[in-house]
Amino acid sequence: MDKEAFVKIKEFKTEVEEDIPLDMLLFFGSRTTDHYRNDSDIDLMIVSEGFKGVNVLDRVAKMYDYWTFMCPVDFICFTPEEFNERKNRFSIVSEALATGVAV
């Protein structure tokens, strides 16, 4: 796992939680393995009640406001209900749950 990225993600989580309570933050994808490249992005799945009533694109845009690191990142943002609807299906949610690291 990319330990430097994990430290950055924990700092990111602290910043976000000053404004938006998070139900879950999962770090997943290649950087959670030993098979990532230097140009690999960071994949984060974020679950929050605070996303209710907020457009999906606006959720992601808001997360970029908190991301201050010089590393590419992909945010996938769900409400708890959206997350629960997808977690038992073959989806990116089930992949993140199976292989991801809770932050």
Image (spheres, rainbow, N blue to C red):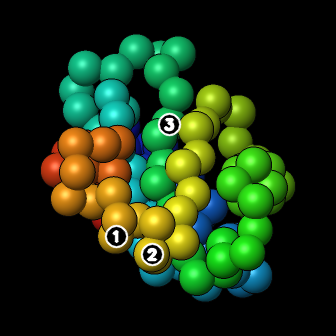
Visible in this render: residue 74?
yes
Helix, strand or loop under label 1: helix
| Residue holding disc 2 | 81
The structure residue drawn at horizontal position 63% and vertical position 32%, both measured from the top left corner, is 71
Residue lying at 58% horizontally and 38% vertically, measured from the top left: 74
- For the residues labelled 3 and 2, the Cα–Cα distance comes to 24 Å
The crowding category of the residue bearing disc 2, from other C-alpha atoms within 10 Å (few below 14, some 14 to 19, many at least 20), is few
Q: Earlier in the sequence, mark 1 or mark 3?
A: 3
Q: CA distance from mark 1 to mark 3?
A: 23 Å
The picture places residue 37, in percent across and down from the top left corner, at 40, 15
Tag 1 near tag 2, CB within 8 Å: yes
Q: Quadrant of the C terminus?
A: bottom left
Of callouts 3 and 2, which one flags the residue occurring earlier in the amino acid sequence? 3
Q: Amino acid at mark 3?
A: Ile
Closer to us: 12 or 61: 61
Residue 18 placed where, x, y %? Answer: 72, 83
Please give the residue where the numbered disc 3 appears in the rendered image.
42
| Local secondary structure at mark 3 | strand
Q: Is residue 34 left or right of residue 76?
A: left
Question: Which amino acid type is marked by label 1?
Answer: Asn
Q: Amino acid at mark 2?
A: Glu
Q: Nearer the viewer, mark 3 or mark 2?
A: 2
Q: Which mark is residue 96?
A: none
* Residue in the picture at 75% in, 68% down: 54
Dot 1 alpha-carbon crowd within 10 angstroms: few under 14, some 14 to 19, many 20 or more? few
> Image check: 7 left or right of 73?
left
User: What residue is rendered at 66% in x and 72% in y?
Assistant: 51
User: Which residue position is annotated with label 1?
Assistant: 84
Q: CA distance from mark 1 to mark 2?
A: 5 Å
